[in-house]
């Protein structure tokens, strides 16, 4: 059959609210033009994030009933640990409540003033947790990854020459570890090839620096490798994922993405000393190492989800449905980041609303307009999220791109929801010249996009 269907049927439904334009205008202004400030019940289609928003399977829900809520030595922990170890190969699997908790623990140990942490592109929480310790978060993406129109199969790849230079100049005294984010969320959900990972691994080994994956979307990255990397097409996504993890010395993992859960994550490590320090901090901030800030039922759901996410029917449907959105926008001439990423379609605001001055938050303005038009909530990944000043050094930062991310929650929306999104974006595109920019009225020192207040310029 040519038609790719959702490989599930729906057992539980959740109503969504259809609002009118006047209501949405009121909501937007009460929220100071910050979509993080909008109540979810005022949103019709919520594409703010694919994180923690997945629909869980009947198997996950039933596994949750098996949760052993013992404080220490829970059976659920050992089940989860076995699954995560089998997948990643890491000796130590340290559960945390979400990805940034793993980042906070990791960089509290290896960060600090003078340290430099290279990545293909740091996600905002990773960057913030590094900078909070006084260290520098360095993005080293290949040039194609910064050009929204460049067609390259692995736009998440690390700039190998740049990495080699950083290590040659600063050495392992200043570079405590190298990270690779798979897929590269900030750069458009773009994958990293196995070939690039092997090359990064070789550089890391040569300089004696560990390599850690930011593995939130490991399954999507593995499927991209299967679809695009020469020689990988005949392999199972689960085998490719295992290869990816085995090139690294550890990972931070937000299971809220490819763990198919609403909360959860883990820190994976091979280094015994680092793991011991991490467990000490874990006890301080998250909880005992056999639950790490989670209920045991969450560990059960993660154990199940980490397997389900690698089912090829699921991955095929996920890729086809995300590409469907992208394809319809491209055909209508809407500028998006290409190729379409794994978990989201990214509108390219610099080309969508070129008349809005870069200092007037073009991507945020576009995101607000889409909400106003149809109650669709996306997220700005541009100058509001990544611009402003480094809170410690005061250096002014400029984002590489100005994007609105439409992230697709896993197993949540059907094709008719996506058709509605397409219709709304085409309407906004037709009327794009009327969209006005925004002024920033208030900002917090860290991660300002979550709480910023703006008003029409
Ligand atoms: N790394 C990446 C690449 C991420 O996308 C995220 C979260 C994190 C780390 C942090 O994980 O939220 O569990 O603490 N991304 C979400 C998003 C928030 O919307 O893309 P967390």
Image (tube, grey):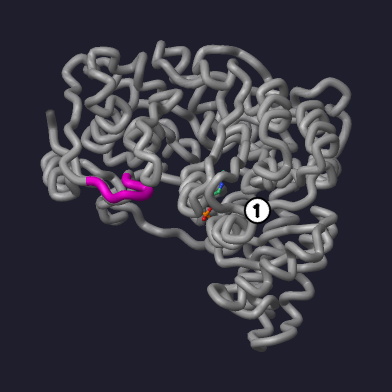
Q: Is mark 1 within 8 Å of ligand 1?
A: yes
Q: Quadrant of the N terminus?
A: top right
63 above or below 134? below
Q: In this figure, which residue is indicated by the disc labeled 1?
A: 252
**Extent of the magenta region:** 443-448
Q: Nearer the viewer, residue 440 or 89?
A: 440
Residue at image location 56% in from the left, 44% down from the top: 114
Tell me how many marks there are: 1
Residue at image location 13% in from the left, 44% down from the top: 29
Q: Quadrant of the C terminus?
A: top left
* In this picture, residue 177 sits left or right of residue 298: right
Would you identify the image quadrant in which residue 183 lies?
top right
Residue at image location 26% in from the left, 15% down from the top: 430
449 above or below 403? below
* In this picture, residue 353 sits left or right of residue 414: left
Q: Nearer the viewer, residue 195 or 127?
A: 127
Look at the magenta stretch and give its main secondary structure. loop
User: Helix, strand, or loop for circle 1?
Assistant: strand
Would you identify the image quadrant in which residue 274 lies?
bottom right
Q: Position of residue 334 (x, y in %)?
A: 39, 16
């Amino acid at each position: 059959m040519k038609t790719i269907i959702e490989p599930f049927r729906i057992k539980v439904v959740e109503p969504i609210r259809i609002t009118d334009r006047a209501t949405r205008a009121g909501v937007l202004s009460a929220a100071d033009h910050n979509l993080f400030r909008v109540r979810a019940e005022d949103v019709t289609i919520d594409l703010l994030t694919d994180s923690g928003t997945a629909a869980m399977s009947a198997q996950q829900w039933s596994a949750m009933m098996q949760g052993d809520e013992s404080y220490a030595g829970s059976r659920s922990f050992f089940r989860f640990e076995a699954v995560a170890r089998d997948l990643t190969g890491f000796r130590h699997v340290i559960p945390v409540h979400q990805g940034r908790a793993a980042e906070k623990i990791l960089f509290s140990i290896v960060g600090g003033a003078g340290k430099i942490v290279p990545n293909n592109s740091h996600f905002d929480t990773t960057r913030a947790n590094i900078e909070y310790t006084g260290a520098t978060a360095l993005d080293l993406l290949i040039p194609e990854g910064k050009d929204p129109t460049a067609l390259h199969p692995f736009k998440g790849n690390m700039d190998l020459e740049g990495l080699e230079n950083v290590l040659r100049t600063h050495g392992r005294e200043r570079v405590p570890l190298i990270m690779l984010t798979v897929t590269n969320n900030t750069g458009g959900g773009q994958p990293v090839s196995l070939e690039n990972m092997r090359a990064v691994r070789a550089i890391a080994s040569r300089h004696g620096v560990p390599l850690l994956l930011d593995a939130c979307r490991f399954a999507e990255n593995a499927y991209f490798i299967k679809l695009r990397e020469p020689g990988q097409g005949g392999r199972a996504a689960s085998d490719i994922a295992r290869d990816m993890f085995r090139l690294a010395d550890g990972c931070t993992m937000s299971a809220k993405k490819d763990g198919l859960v609403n909360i959860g994550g883990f820190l994976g490590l091979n280094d015994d000393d680092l793991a011991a320090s991490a467990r000490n901090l874990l006890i301080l901030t998250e909880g005992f190492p056999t639950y790490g800030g989670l209920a045991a039922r969450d560990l059960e759901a993660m154990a199940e989800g980490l397997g389900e996410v690698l089912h090829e029917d699921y991955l095929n449907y996920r890729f086809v449905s995300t590409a469907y959105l992208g394809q319809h926008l491209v055909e209508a001439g809407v500028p998006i980041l290409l190729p379409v990423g794994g978990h989201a379609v990214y509108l390219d605001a610099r080309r969508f609303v070129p008349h809005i001055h870069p200092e007037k938050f073009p991507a945020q303005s576009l995101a607000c307009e889409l909400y106003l038009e149809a109650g669709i909530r996306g997220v700005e990944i541009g100058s509001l999220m990544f611009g402003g000043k480094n809170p410690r050094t005061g250096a002014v930062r400029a984002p590489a791109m100005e994007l609105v991310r439409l992230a697709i929650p896993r197993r949540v929306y059907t094709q008719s929801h996506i058709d509605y999104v397409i219709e709304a974006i085409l309407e906004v595109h037709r009327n794009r010249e009327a969209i006005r920019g925004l002024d920033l009225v208030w900002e917090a020192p860290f991660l300002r996009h979550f709480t910023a207040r703006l008003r029409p310029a």
